[in-house]
Amino acid sequence: MDPLSIAAVGWLMSSLVDKAVTALLEAWAKRNDLGNEFKTLKDQLLQLGALLTSYRGLRTNNNFLEELVHNLQQLAYRAENLLDELDYYRLEDQIQQRDLGF
């Protein structure tokens, strides 16, 4: 299999895993009365991702805009860390339920 095909399969698998984890996390958030907050965070991350993707192709000498994009990237990293932390709590709940026999 050529490297491009391997990369494409890897990307597809990563995308599928991300979607599965997101679905599990979203269901957990709803069960814990965090559904609205999770949806808001997810929507804002999608918007931020679109904004940052569109900025990548631009060349600018606008220092203010570059600083703003840098700050947005930092916020995106923090949001990603928050999602990872929420997923940790979801997994912790899953383990506790298994240990309790639910």
Image: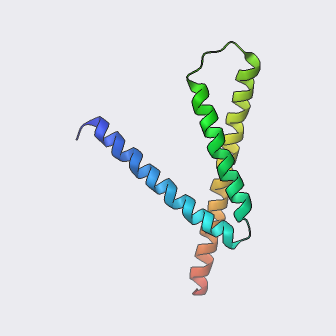
Q: Whole-percent x and y of residue 100?
A: 61, 85
- Quadrant assignment, res 31: bottom right
Q: Is residue 51 above or below residue 64?
A: below
Q: Whole-percent x and y of residue 64?
A: 77, 20
Residue, far right: 64
Q: Whole-percent x and y of residue 92?
A: 63, 70
Q: Is residue 90 above or below residue 38?
A: below
Q: Quadrant of the C terminus?
A: bottom right
Tell me how many marks there are: 0
Q: What residue do we see at 61% from left, 80% from top?
A: 97
Q: What residue do we see at 73% from left, 65% from top?
A: 34
Q: What residue do we see at 64% from left, 48% from top?
A: 80
Residue, far bottom: 101
Q: Whole-percent x and y of residue 38?
A: 69, 58
Q: What residue do we see at 63% from left, 67% from top?
A: 90
- Quadrant assignment, res 59: top right
Identify the image's colour scheme: rainbow, by chain, secondary structure or one colour: rainbow
Q: Is residue 81 above or below residue 20?
A: above
Residue, far top: 61
- Quadrant assignment, res 7: top left
**Is residue 101 rendered to the left or right of residue 79?**
left
Q: Quadrant of the N terminus?
A: top left
Residue, far left: 1
